[in-house]
């Protein structure tokens, strides 16, 4: 669309998942007949556009649109199904195969290469030794695939948190191994997992889980919500599109043999040790989702107290999701407390489900009963893993700052709160003085759980990018000092500049190279810049 009032309307496009619209399939067929390669395509029709049409919000919808029917259907299912029921992949077929008597032919459907997830455009590499063969067999059971190449990527094949737990638990039981859950991020193939089994299962793993590894910039450290498993942050890391790795900070207590820390202060202290071991010098970028926002805030405070610089603190949906219950909300970690049970269930289902919570309250009155309730309803869910997550949640559910503790904590880094639709108050609401400048609050249309899902995560990413751009523009600091005539030796100037630079970088959350300091002697002594 331009000043000539000529506009274009989408009339078809190819799809990243292969579910192209008819116009895209037709042009590919034409190109194949001509012996030429196909590729991504986008089709439109043009014509005159009125001023009323130009002003309409819908004119902005088709600026870029590469989502086909399969992606749109899966996005829609996210709004109606809990996480564990969302299909790994949606496949759109022209017709379903049928038997001679007209019924759907399930065997023919399963044998179709259209439903073999994640193998397109990659060479098939068969297992080469006994360990790879056994891991491949477990992979096929968990992922429900007929075949698997040892170089297929777990996430490209539709892997999610429940499947990851199921696969790693089966591998550990079969091989008597001790692979931690986070290994699926660093070794997401049959080949990689077999290599870890043959060597030291825990070597090279860290609670700083690489959810997005690309980029040469400083990493973003992001804490997940209650339960401490960072898998649901993965889509956020992928969509950011920055030149920076995105690390999820996994809670201590998720893996066998780990004991959860009993206070936020302890949790943050251990996380800070891991962060500074990987990145010895700041500035540090700290984000936190839901409960993780509290740990991110505490980690920022501890880093600054240790003399480090934190450039951003992003608190994503720091308030608790709304839970409708009868009577006053007790906020206690009890299996007879409706609020606790509803929120604990949401850690596994990815949503508040009042009906499921009511059934759980009626059937499970204690920790073991709850674990069995969850494991029975979620295929492949390991009861021991459920128990470990439950114990992390039970310890952290009631964690909060007292007003006195919050008054004692003041951080220099700019704070941005991304408030989810419908959330209750966060730990910072009603308080002041905890930061050098008042926090910026960004209201989101997505609710507490949707902010990390398809649809909602795009809104969050746009808001995050906007805030990053604003703070980057304001990062340079200039200080002008007028002083009485004085003569200082070079080493005295050096010490003075170092002290001033440290003060300015801490106050403005910027790097030393962005600081300029001008000294102006009063009377006729001129000025000096350093």
Image (spheres, rainbow, N blue to C red):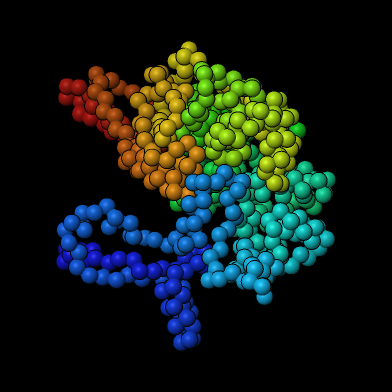
Q: Position of residue 228 (x, y in %)?
A: 60, 35
Q: Which residue is pictured at 70% across the width and 43% down the height? A: 381
Q: Nearer the viewer, residue 30 or 379?
A: 379
Q: Position of residue 348 (x, y in %)?
A: 62, 38
**Horizontal side of residue 520 vs 337, given as left or right:** left
Q: Quadrant of residue 484?
A: top left
Q: Position of residue 339 (x, y in %)?
A: 56, 25
Q: Which residue is pictured at 67% across the width and 75% down the height? A: 100
Instruction: In the displayed orientation, state which residue is furthest to the top.
Output: 404
**Horizontal side of residue 483 vs 337, given as left or right:** left
* Residue 26 in the image: above or below residue 240: below
Q: Is residue 459 visible?
A: yes
Instruction: In the displayed orientation, state which residue is furthest to the bottom.
Output: 34
* Residue 477 in the image: above or below residue 209: above
Q: Nearer the viewer, residue 345 or 239?
A: 345
Q: The N terminus appears in which quarter of the rendering?
A: bottom left
Q: Nearer the viewer, residue 449 or 378?
A: 378
Q: The C terminus appears in which quarter of the rendering?
A: top left
* Residue 124 in the image: above or below residue 357: below
Q: Which residue is pictured at 42% across the width and 62% down the height? A: 66
């Amino acid at each position: 669309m331009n000043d000539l009032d000529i506009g274009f309307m989408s009339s078809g496009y190819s799809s990243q998942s292969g579910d192209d619209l008819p116009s895209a399939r037709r042009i590919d067929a034409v190109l194949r007949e001509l012996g030429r390669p196909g590729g991504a395509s986008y089709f439109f029709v043009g014509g005159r556009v009125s001023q009323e049409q130009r002003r309409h919000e819908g004119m902005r919808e088709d600026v870029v649109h590469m989502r086909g029917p399969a992606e749109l259907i899966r996005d829609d299912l996210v709004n109606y199904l809990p996480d564990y029921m969302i299909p790994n992949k949606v496949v759109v077929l022209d017709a379903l195969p049928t038997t001679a008597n007209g019924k759907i032919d399930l065997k023919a459907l399963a044998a179709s290469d259209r439903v073999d997830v994640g193998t397109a455009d990659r060479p098939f590499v068969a297992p080469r030794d006994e360990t790879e063969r056994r891991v491949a067999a477990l992979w096929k059971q968990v992922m429900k695939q007929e075949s698997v190449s040892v170089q297929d990527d777990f996430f490209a094949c539709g892997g999610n948190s429940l499947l990851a737990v199921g696969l790693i638990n089966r591998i550990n039981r079969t091989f008597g191994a001790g692979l931690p859950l986070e290994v699926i991020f660093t070794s997401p193939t049959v080949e990689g997992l077999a290599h870890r089994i043959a060597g030291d299962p825990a070597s090279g793993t860290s609670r700083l889980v690489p959810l997005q590894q690309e980029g040469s910039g400083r990493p973003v450290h992001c804490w997940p919500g209650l339960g401490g498993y960072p898998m649901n942050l993965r889509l956020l890391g992928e969509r950011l599109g920055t030149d920076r790795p995105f690390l999820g900070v996994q809670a201590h207590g998720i893996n066998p043999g780990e004991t959860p820390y009993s206070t936020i202060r302890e949790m943050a202290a251990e996380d800070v040790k891991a962060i500074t071991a990987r990145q010895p010098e700041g500035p540090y970028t700290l984000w936190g989702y839901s409960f993780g926002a509290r740990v991110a805030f505490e980690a920022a405070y501890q880093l600054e107290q240790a003399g480090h610089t934190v450039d951003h603190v992003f608190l994503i949906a720091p308030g608790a999701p709304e839970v409708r219950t009868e009577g006053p909300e007790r906020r206690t970690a009890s299996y007879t407390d409706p609020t606790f049970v509803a929120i604990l269930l949401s850690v596994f289902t990815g949503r508040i489900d009042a009906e499921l919570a009511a059934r759980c309250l009626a059937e499970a009155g204690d920790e073991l009963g709850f674990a069995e309730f969850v494991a029975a309803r979620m295929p492949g869910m390991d009861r021991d893993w459920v128990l470990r997550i439950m114990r992390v949640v039970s310890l952290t559910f009631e964690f909060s700052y007292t007003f006195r503790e919050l008054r004692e904590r003041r951080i220099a880094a700019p704070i941005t709160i991304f408030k989810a639709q419908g959330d209750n108050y966060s730990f910072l609401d009603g308080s002041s003085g905890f930061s050098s400048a008042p926090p910026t609050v960004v209201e989101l249309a997505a609710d507490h759980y949707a902010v990390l899902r398809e649809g909602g995560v795009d809104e969050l990413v746009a808001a995050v990018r906007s805030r990053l751009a604003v703070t980057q523009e304001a990062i340079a600091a200039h200080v002008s000092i007028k002083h009485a005539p004085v003569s200082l030796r070079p080493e005295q100037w050096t010490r003075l500049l170092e002290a001033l630079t440290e003060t300015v970088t801490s106050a403005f959350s910027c790097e030393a190279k962005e600081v300029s300091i001008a000294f102006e002697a009063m009377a006729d002594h001129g000025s000096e810049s350093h």
